[in-house]
Image (tube, rainbow, N blue to C red):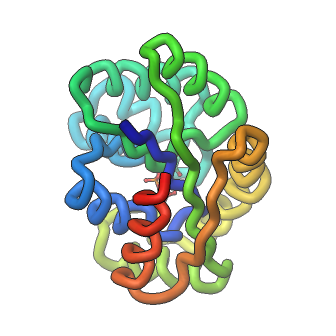
Amino acid sequence: MKNIVLFGPPGAGKGTQSEFLVAEYGFVHLSTGDIFRQNISQNSELGILAKTFIDKGKLVPDSITIDMLKSELLKYSDSVGFLFDGFPRTEDQAEALDVFLAKEELEITAMIALEVSNDELKYRLLERGKVSGRSDDANPEIIDNRLKIYFEETDIVKRHYEKQGKYIALSGMGSVNEISTVLKTKIDRL
Ligand code: ADP
């Protein structure tokens, strides 16, 4: 069983590559952004709360995010492997995930990071904003805030996995298919 953290800034292509990886390996895809958006569309208590942070380009507080992720993961006891997308985004989330997975006799196999230049990220997010209906993609100031928070708070999470010898970086520039091919080669070697 392989459990992968797909990592990278907003707009790096995590969602796109997740679709490929789910089709290829049958992973259970746990995207905290998707789960928040689902809650927002259902107007759940969690969704209403999360929206106040997401609309400003801020991170949702750790306690809320971690509890949500745990209860989601427990729904899939027969998974062939988990693909984490957008989680962990802080050191505390990474530590909580290790502890929680260990209780389930699971562990992260690798963190795979998609590296993309800042200009390309902004371009992709603004383009996505034209069609996705995501309010956090439509506004350049909110995009800048998300990228700032990523480089201030989230980027360091890679050190958590580097220390464990589980960090793999690859270029997220190029065509979707090219990146999928490289990703598959890396995962097959794990
Ligand atoms: P992107 O990677 O394009 O920023 P996501 O769909 O992963 O988009 O996340 C959208 C928003 O949801 C984030 O900007 C943040 O507000 C919130 N969010 C998602 N995952 C987390 C997380 N692990 N911790 C805190 N907030 C999160």
| Of 77 and 74, the residue lying toward us | 77
Q: Is residue 32 visible?
A: no
| Of 41 and 187, the residue lying toward us | 187
As drawn, 116 above or below 157: below
Q: Does 176 sit left or right of 24 as displayed? A: right
Q: How many marks?
A: 0
Instruction: Looking at this view, name the residue that lies furthest to the top.
Output: 103
Residue 129 in percent (x, y) is at 40, 73
Write down the quadrant of residue 95 in the picture. top right
Please give the name of the residue rendered at 44% of the width and 62% of the height, measured from the top-left corner.
14
Instruction: Looking at this view, name the residue that lies furthest to the bottom.
Output: 174
Residue 99 in percent (x, y) is at 59, 17
Please give the name of the residue rendered at 35% of the width and 26% of the height, measured from the top-left corner.
73
Q: Is residue 94 visible?
A: yes
Instruction: Looking at this view, name the residue that lies furthest to the front.
Output: 189
Residue 145 in percent (x, y) is at 67, 60
Please give the name of the residue rendered at 64% of the width and 46% of the height, measured from the top-left corner.
166
Q: Does 57 sit left or right of 148 as displayed? A: left
Residue 136 in percent (x, y) is at 47, 60
Write down the quadrant of residue 142 in the picture. bottom right
Please give the name of the residue rendered at 68% of the width and 56% of the height, measured from the top-left corner.
150
As drawn, 87 above or below 167: above
As drawn, 27 above or below 70: below
Looking at the rendered image, the quarter that the N terminus falls into is top left
| Of 75 and 102, the residue lying toward us | 102
As drawn, 187 above or below 46: below
